[in-house]
């Protein structure tokens, strides 16, 4: 079971949007369960609109990621588990980081988002968790300026950042309100989520293998 947390205590950065898109993409490669750790329940609401298929499956009602992952390991081992984190609560985020093989940290390409994402990055660094920042909602017009600036700033501090940036696309917004994902509605979104999933999957699988091999 490979556990991927989509976490950032900064709100509105695309955690739920990317969790849904990546989980649906991952379900083509294996069994997937998403744990909704957000009491707002955005992901669960989306899941309800989707019509409750069993892949990806959904687990709600667990406040702590550690309890959720333990329950999944005992009862229903999935190939991939995604944790959709809440905004604000560093306690929930910190607990979730401990059980992740890989933490995906979405953020917008702005100085404010980079600064507000430091808390989550620092928690990952302190706990030795593997993590990957993802620039999300990048406007095509600003990709060369803001996007590259943000990427270079992160790289200067040796912070891992996905090669794939997710663009600002209306299908990501509209699909969510009908229980779909951007990639299920739009070819350009599908191509970038395929590329992001390749990166996330290989980093998560490598980190899970390294964890297993460590004493
Ligand atoms: N790539 C994108 N293109 C366009 N809109 C996006 C994109 N990613 C996210 N959004 C929009 O940004 C808003 C916030 O996204 P989302 O709810 O996924 O963020 P979140 O981090 O889960 O928020 P919260 O912290 O409240 O849980 C939503 O309106 C969503 O439709
Ligand atoms: Mg959310």
Image (tube, rainbow, N blue to C red):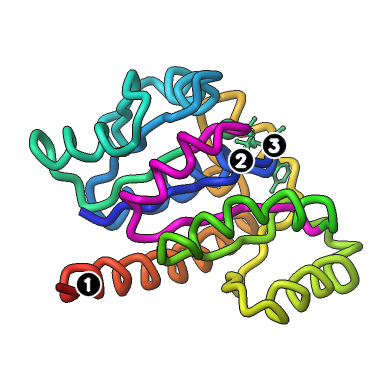
Residue tagged 3: 12
| Marks 2, 1: nearer the viewer | 2
Quarter of the view holding residue 188: bottom right
Rate crowding at label 3 as few (under 14), some (14 to 19) or many (20 or more) other CA atoms within 10 Å: some
- The disc label shown at residue 15, or none: none
Q: Nearer the viewer, residue 201 or 133?
A: 133
Ligand 1 lies in which image quarter?
A: top right
Residue tagged 2: 9
Say which residue appears at 17% left-offset and 33% top-offset: 71
Q: Residue 144, how many percent across, how many down?
A: 86, 73
- The disc label shown at residue 209, or none: 1
Look at the numbered discs 1 and 3 and tell me whether their residues touch, using CB distance below 8 Å.
no
Q: Does the segment drawn in magenta span residue 108?
A: yes
Find the residue positioned furthest to the front: 126
Q: CA distance from mark 2 to mark 1?
A: 27 Å
Give the structural element (helix, strand or loop) at label 3: loop
Q: CA distance from mark 3 to mark 2?
A: 9 Å
Give the structural element (helix, strand or loop) at label 2: loop
**Between discs 2 and 1, the one toward the N terminus:** 2
Look at the numbered discs 3 and 2 and tell me whether their residues touch, using CB distance below 8 Å.
no
Q: Nearer the viewer, residue 129 or 169?
A: 129
Find the residue positioned furthest to the left: 74
Question: Horizontally, is 189 left or right of 108 in the view?
Answer: left
Say which residue appears at 84% left-offset and 73% top-offset: 149
Q: CA distance from mark 1 to mark 3?
A: 32 Å
**Range of residues picked out in magenta:** 85-109
Q: Residue 159, how many percent across, how many down?
A: 61, 73
């Amino acid at each position: 079971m490979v556990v991927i947390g989509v976490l950032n205590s900064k709100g509105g950065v695309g955690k739920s949007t990317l969790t849904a898109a990546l989980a649906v993409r991952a379900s083509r490669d294996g069994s997937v369960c998403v744990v909704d750790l957000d009491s707002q329940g955005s992901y669960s609401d989306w899941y309800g609109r989707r019509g409750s298929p069993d892949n990806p499956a959904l687990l709600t009602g667990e406040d702590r990621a550690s309890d959720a992952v333990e329950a999944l390991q005992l009862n229903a081992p999935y190939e991939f588990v995604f944790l959709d984190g809440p905004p604000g609560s560093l306690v929930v985020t910190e607990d979730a980081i401990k059980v992740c093989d890989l933490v995906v940290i979405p953020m917008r390409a702005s100085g404010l988002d980079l600064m507000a994402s430091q808390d989550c990055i620092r928690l990952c660094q302190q706990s030795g968790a593997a993590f990957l920042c993802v620039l999300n909602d990048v406007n095509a017009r600003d990709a060369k300026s803001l996007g590259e600036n943000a990427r270079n700033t992160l790289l200067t501090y040796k912070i891992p950042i996905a090669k794939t940036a997710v663009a600002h696309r209306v299908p990501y917004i509209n699909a969510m309100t009908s229980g779909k994902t951007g990639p299920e509605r739009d070819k350009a979104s599908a191509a970038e989520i395929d590329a992001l999933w390749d990166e996330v999957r290989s980093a998560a699988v490598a980190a899970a293998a390294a964890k297993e091999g460590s004493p």
